[in-house]
Image (cartoon, grey):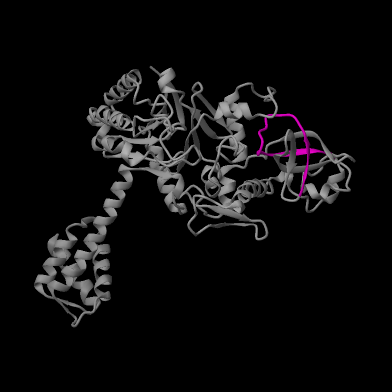
Amino acid sequence: MVATTRKKVHRKFKMRGYTLKMEALEEILSFLSRFEDAEEEAIDLLLDELEKESLKSSIIDRDSVHRVTSLLLEAEAAVEATAASSNRSPLRIIDAFVVPRFRYDSVKKTFYEHTGKLPLHGDASAKAALYRDRFELLLQRISRDPHFSKPVFDPEMIHSGNRSCEISSIQSLIGHTGRRWIMGVISQLEDGRFYLEDLTEAIHKVTTGFFVENTVIVAEGELLPNGTFQVNTCGFPPLEDRDETLAALVGLDFFGGGSLTMEETLRLSALEKKAVNDMFVILSDIWVDDEETMEKLATVLEGYENVEVVPSLFVLMGNFCSRPCNLSFSSFSTLRSQFGKLGEKIGSCPRLKEHSRFLFIPGPDDLGPSTVLPRRALPKYMVEELQMHVPNAIFASNPCRIKFYTQEIVVFRQDLLYRMRRSCLVPPSTEETSDHFEHLVATISHQSHLCPLPLTVQPIMWNYDHCLRLYPTPHTIILGDKSEQKAFKYTGITCFSPGSFANDSTFVAYRPCSQEVELSAL
């Protein structure tokens, strides 16, 4: 075999005009021993790289060969390390504050990315842009819906029973009669009086349904002589299939995990299908200052420590304290040590500590500069002792995003259901469902936004409103809420709430490979 390889090397080098010294040949043979199944390709690659070198002679010595083979072996090791790292860690945690911001150009009909640094405190124009960007995002989405597009080849269909539902601007209604479809934002321009407003004008809203101030709706009706738009039917802008959205965005990365080529997507999809043992455990309301909660958590950790394949990820959401960490809170050093005790409990489970990752997401009443969204990760001072016991712990913003191979998962900790119900302008319809959680999932999905509440109810950083977008629709939405645990699949989107672990001892085991949700409790 070695003699055959020697002849092969001599022949190929001679064809390129090179003569090999004995020590150079021995160096080449040592290099080729690593590639017994691909000797031909390895020799060709070596020759290609040698030709890039500035050789002084056609007689090749050992140093020239060693220099090239060292570079090739280093490159191979780097590729193998990257692949191994990718296989060990298919998860990517994306902080809200690094999510790219895209704005829609209604003239050029395209999105463009904001490249400059975004200040935390925006000016007045940033607040106006927040509402305009939300509206234009949904308007460009509905413009692709065949039910709301203008008929091109058969204008007569407007007068037939199959009429078009083309969206009209509110301004264009003035002086026209007949039924029209409009799209606008519910706004309270005067105390106690709600209006439907788009980018051109505003009209008085008369409608029924499950709507909150600042949500975008589509309504069908007729403008009366007194300026009131009499609504017959109304609802949220229709959803768009995720694949259709991705095709329209032409490779733009709205999620923040990086754009993937078709080849990368196919490769990751194949790996994802094999990841049948990967499991996430999600818990909300982990009160580190409550002894009973910590005992229950220890039971959960010990249980998963003894299973055959430990979970890939534990998502621990706040609140992390049984009472709000507001201006009257004074036990910061105590809370810091209690986080350290949580780290000890995790560290006492060696298999979980080595093979699982732990993601910590702050709750609405946790320590931080304010209650405004998105929230920064837990302060470093508070979690330093925990990190000493759990070095692979991850502290992310609220909300945050998880990329699992090709899957996109959004995690949000907020008592959203209670606040949405309190902010409803009218009681929710019970025609399709009486489950309030299902109403909530439908609302945030159609609005393409995690928190479509008025800013007076839930403040949002004007320049970072894009961090709460659900566009394109993710595969999974995890809503940490103090209400009872629920799971609901809506138009292909898996959405669930793990419930309150401190109050109800509930949590969720989730298998991202099959999008299977297992509602669990102690």
**110 inside magenta stretch:** no
Q: Position of residue 410 (x, y in %)?
A: 48, 38
Quadrant containing the C terminus is top left
Q: Position of residue 332 (x, y in %)?
A: 34, 32
Quadrant containing the N terminus is bottom left
Left or right: residue 269 compared with residue 462: left
Q: Nearer the viewer, residue 300 or 413?
A: 413
The answer to whether residue 39 is visible is no
- For the view shown, which residue lies furthest in the bottom direction? 56
The number of numbered badges drawn on the structure is 0
Q: Which residues are magenta?
A: 201-222
Eyeballing the image, is 109 above or below 407?
below
Identify the image quadrant of residue 425: top right
Residue in view at x 21 percent, y 69 percent:
68
Q: Nearer the viewer, residue 359 or 337?
A: 337
Q: Nearer the viewer, residue 395 or 7?
A: 395
Q: Position of residue 325 (x, y in %)?
A: 41, 31
The answer to whether residue 36 is visible is yes
Identify the image quadrant of residue 290: top left
Left or right: residue 312 compared with residue 515: left
Q: Position of residue 424 (x, y in %)?
A: 66, 29
Identify the image quadrant of residue 512: top left
**221 inside magenta stretch:** yes
Left or right: residue 267 compared with residue 31: right
Q: Nearer the viewer, residue 89 or 56?
A: 89
